[in-house]
Amino acid sequence: MDALAGHIESWFDRLAWLLIAAALLLVLGEFAIVALRYGLDWSRPWLQELVLAANAIVFLLGAGYTLRHDGHVRVDIWSRQRSERTQALLELIGVGLFLLPFQLFLLWVSVPYVLRSWRIGETSSQQGGLPALYLVKALIPLAALLLLLAGIGLALRAASRWRRAGRGQPA
């Protein structure tokens, strides 16, 4: 179980480089927008939309990465005083009842939305905006898939912790 979880989670470490590049593009792009607008009185819609696309990459794809590295905010009111075995069980219940079903729902509703966008070759509504808006929209089901995979990895690790704690082994 731990090997499969490790294999799933290794993909998130590879994703980190894309997130770093997108964050850098976001910062440099925003700096360019401000400098060009106020320094040269020059503005381009495609540059503004490129920054929005970088923002979408960072936040949508970064959600799975953050979950994999346990960086999300947690309110451990129920589990902080519990045993390791109970904590692992609560983690399994949380992933099984909330995270996985919501990500499956998000996939179910977003895939037709994105396919329609691809089918019509959706572009920006602004003159001079990004020519392939459907690529940005494709991040929505991709984010759901990444969160689903991170949740599976989290559940596998929790199940392994639960089993080990039941046998009296250190988690």
Image: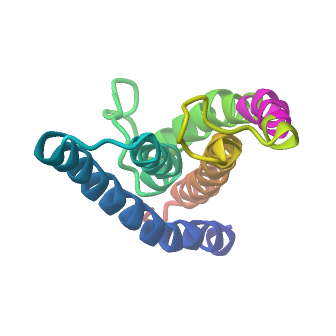
Drawn side of residue 136 relative to residue 26, left or right: right
Image quadrant where one finds the N terminus: bottom right
- Residue drawn at point x = 49 percent, y = 60 percent: 168
Give coordinates of residue 47: x percent, y percent. Answer: 40, 48
Instruction: Locate residue 8: give its quadrant.
Output: bottom right
The type of colouring in the image is: rainbow
Give coordinates of residue 129: x percent, y percent. Answer: 53, 41
- Residue drawn at point x = 35 percent, y = 48 percent: 71
How many labels sit on residues?
0
Foreground of the two, 125 or 80:
125
Give coordinates of residue 83: x percent, y percent. Answer: 41, 42
Drawn side of residue 119 relative to residue 10, left or right: right
Write the start and end of the magenta stretch as one range.
106-116
Q: Residue furthest left?
A: 39
- Residue drawn at point x = 62 percent, y = 34 percent: 99
Q: Is residue 107 magenta?
A: yes
